[in-house]
Image (cartoon, grey):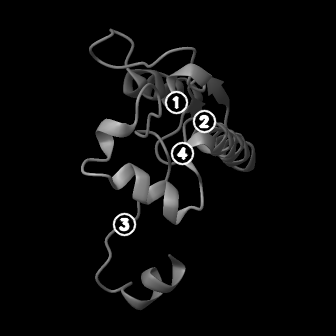
Amino acid sequence: MDIFLNKHQESILGVVEGFDRIIFKGYLTSMFPDGAFGRYLSKRGVLLKDAGKFFESETKTLVEHAKTTAEEAGRPYHFLASAHTHASGRSKEAMARAIAEQDGIAEGLAACRTFPAPEPNML
């Protein structure tokens, strides 16, 4: 990524990083039409029978990344027991804005959040 950013820095206005909008819950096969799910696992060297353990490991990696990012930035880490959306009446954006306002954050990281890992039978 750094190579790309350095090469094109004159054309880049900003960079967005993070996992805020990635939710791995339920069945992922609908995200991979026409056999793409199988190809993805194959490219990663994962047999379909091992997909559950693979995604458990990926979830752990995402959670650890979120915790590390929050710690390095001196910001809080919050575990959310369920998805927070505008539709549910519990918006992640509203929560982040409240934390930023409470802590006087005008820009940068307000907090890191993760969701529970999917149940093993959901994979």
User: Does the CB distance between marks 2 and 4 fall below 8 Å?
Assistant: no
Can you tell which mark lies on residue 52?
2
Q: Name which residue lies at 58% across and 51% down.
A: 47
Residue named by callout 3: 14
> Mark 2 or 4, which is nearer the eye?
4
Q: In this view, does 110 lie to the left or right of 64?
A: left
Nearest the eye: 101 or 45: 45
Q: Is residue 76 above or below residue 94?
A: below
> Mark 3 or 4, which is nearer the eye?
4
Can you tell which mark lies on residue 48?
4
The numbered mark, 1 or 3, whose residue comes first in the sequence reads 3
Q: Name the amino acid, label 3.
A: Gly
Residue 22 position within the rendered picture, expressed as x and y whole percent measured from the top left? 43, 40
Q: Name the amino acid, label 2.
A: Gly
The numbered mark, 1 or 4, whose residue comes first in the sequence reads 4
Residue 55: quarter of image: top right
User: Does the CB distance between marks 3 and 4 fall below 8 Å?
Assistant: no
> Mark 1 or 4, which is nearer the eye?
4
